[in-house]
Image (tube, rainbow, N blue to C red):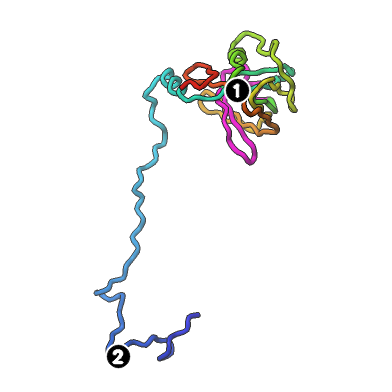
Amino acid sequence: MVLPAKGRPGKCPTAAGSQTAHHNSPRHPARTASPLVNSSPPRPAIARSPSFSAREFRDALGMFATGVTIVTARNAAGEPIGLTANSFNSVSLEPPLVLWSLSRAAASMPAFANGSHYAINVLAAGQKALAERFAARGIDRFAGVDHQPGISGAPLLAGALATFECFNRSRYEEGDHVIFVGEVERCRHHAGLPPLLYHGGRFYTEHPL
């Protein structure tokens, strides 16, 4: 409650001979708020058609230098499977989430999509031959490769720069790929080792620039 100043109850005193200001008089018209105007252009419903070829798109993506991983798991028969991928990325710290993507046409898609776990092995600079091996077709990729099973059975590759053992949390189909989001149950890393890099369609054991 605001108490009135001294004078007549409920009214504020004015100086002698002064006139009370009338804020709503013609000389002082009342101000009204103007409505907000949305000046932003309407959002398009769909994207424009690409102005480039698939080859140009691939070449442009190749300018983004990345690390290299081998994603491993076990199929329904318990056999180890794995492939080279550079689409690995972090998603969240709480909970610990990572992602990677796989072509919908990949032969290993059923095993990765239906399995409960997989492991992501980040390769060191000295593992270029391993990256090339797990990108090749028609061979036994695990023949002669030193590895051991993780807590879920997914193979962990010896000498990897880091390993992430993941629960197959969720999958999202986008275009011709499936995005896998994994919840990390255990991770390890070896500090001080240089990473294997991928840039412009080539593997590098040193920075290419």
Q: Earlier in the sequence, mark 2 or mark 1?
A: 2
Measured as percent of width and height from the top left, residue 56 is found at: 41, 20
Q: Which residue is mark 1?
A: 69
Camera-nearest residue between 165 and 78: 165
Residue at (70% x, 32% y) in the render: 186
Numbered label attached to residue 19: none
Q: Secondary structure at mark 1?
A: strand
Task: Give the alpha-carbon distance from disc 2 to disc 1, as whole Å.
Answer: 88 Å
- Marks 2 & 1, CB-CB < 8 Å contact: no
Give the residue furthest to the top: 138
Q: Which residues are magenta?
A: 86-114
Compared to residue 17, the image places residue 98 above or below, namely above
Q: Is residue 122 left or right of residue 22?
A: right
Measured as percent of width and height from the top left, residue 103 is found at: 56, 21
Q: Is residue 190 left or right of residue 5?
A: right
Q: Is residue 157 left or right of residue 202?
A: right
Q: Residue 187: name its quadrant.
A: top right
Magenta-drawn stretch contains 148: no
Q: Secondary structure at mark 2?
A: loop
Compared to residue 33, the image places residue 76 above or below, namely above
Magenta-drawn stretch contains 109: yes
Q: Which residue is mark 2?
A: 16
Residue at (47% x, 84% y) in the render: 3
Camera-nearest residue between 55 and 121: 121
Crowd rating for badge 1 (residues with CA inside 10 Å; few <14, some 14–19, many 20+): many
Mark 2 or mark 1, which is nearer to you? 1
Measured as percent of width and height from the top left, residue 72 is found at: 66, 21
Question: Label 2 is placed on what type of residue?
Answer: Ala
Camera-nearest residue between 139 and 64: 64
